[in-house]
Image (cartoon, rainbow, N blue to C red):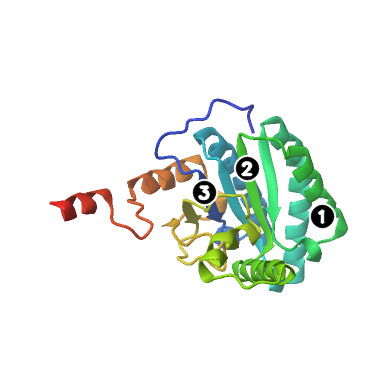
Amino acid sequence: MPKKTPNQKTAKTPAHVAVIMDGNGRWAARRGLPRVMGHRQGAQAVRRVIEAAADLGVQYITLFGFSSENWGRPAPEVQELMGLLRTYLRSNTAELHENDIRMKVIGDRRAFDPDIVALIENAERLTADNTRLTVIIALNYGGRLDIAQAVHRLTADWFVAGRKPDLKEVEERFAGFLMTAGIPDPDILIRTSGEQRISNFLLWQCAYTELVFTETLWPDFDREDLEAALVEYGRRDRRFGALSHSQTTTAKT
């Protein structure tokens, strides 16, 4: 990752980009390689995309690194993924810090080995005050689990207070109990490899997110692909359930 340069933010640049990084296995299979090689190339794509996002003026990027369902994969593949995670945290934390990039991890850490948890905590602590870009990595994360634990925390909070809230208050306060509390909802969700589903990722947060699906496999995803997705985002008319400006104007005439 090169030293930081002035951000190239425009009026159409989304503040928060979420990415489902899909296609590592297919990338390897098409080349007659073991799946682990696809994951290793995918780790290189992570570095490229973080670099591009920072340069383009994105403020937050959330990467779906390891879902709560991924533990069901073959043990050697899970072991390889854990090794790649260790390598990434050891090799890139200092570089992220030098480039004024903050790292935050969401998900249930209790399933990870203590050394991985320590590496995560070190990365978060070292980069906590950086402001150029926040990289959120979802590890052992699931959208339903996120919502369930938020409900648990929220109801416990009110139980202690001894009162029953109305639904409007629940909706207004709910986001503050999610794992992404304090982070704006994604403006755009990109999924690579041609699959068109969100796979239990940021279910509450993506209520009004623009979805962009690309045929590019994750290990091949680069700055050009990210820019193309952001151009597509710029074409969208985000209405959040209301009328667009043109519809409003027509309705008044």
In primary-sequence order, the first of circles 2 and 1 is: 1
Residue at the farthest right position: 114
The residue at the point 76 percent across, 58 percent down is 82
The residue at the point 68 percent across, 35 percent down is 130
| The quadrant where residue 251 appears | bottom left
Q: Position of residue 199 (x, y in %)?
A: 55, 68
Q: CA distance from mark 2 to mark 1?
A: 19 Å
Q: CA distance from mark 1 to mark 3?
A: 25 Å
As helix, strand or loop, the secondary structure at mark 3 comes to strand
In primary-sequence order, the first of circles 1 and 3 is: 3
Dot 3 surroundings within 10 Å: few (below 14), some, or many (20 or more)? Answer: many
Q: Quadrant of the image for the N terminus?
A: top right
The residue identified by callout 1 is 117
Amino acid at the residue labelled 2: Thr
| The quadrant where residue 55 appears | top right
Q: How many numbered marks are there?
A: 3
Residue at the farthest left position: 253
The residue identified by callout 2 is 134
Residue 34 at least partly seen: no
Amino acid at the residue labelled 3: Val
As helix, strand or loop, the secondary structure at mark 1 comes to helix
Residue 114 at least partly seen: yes
The residue identified by callout 3 is 17
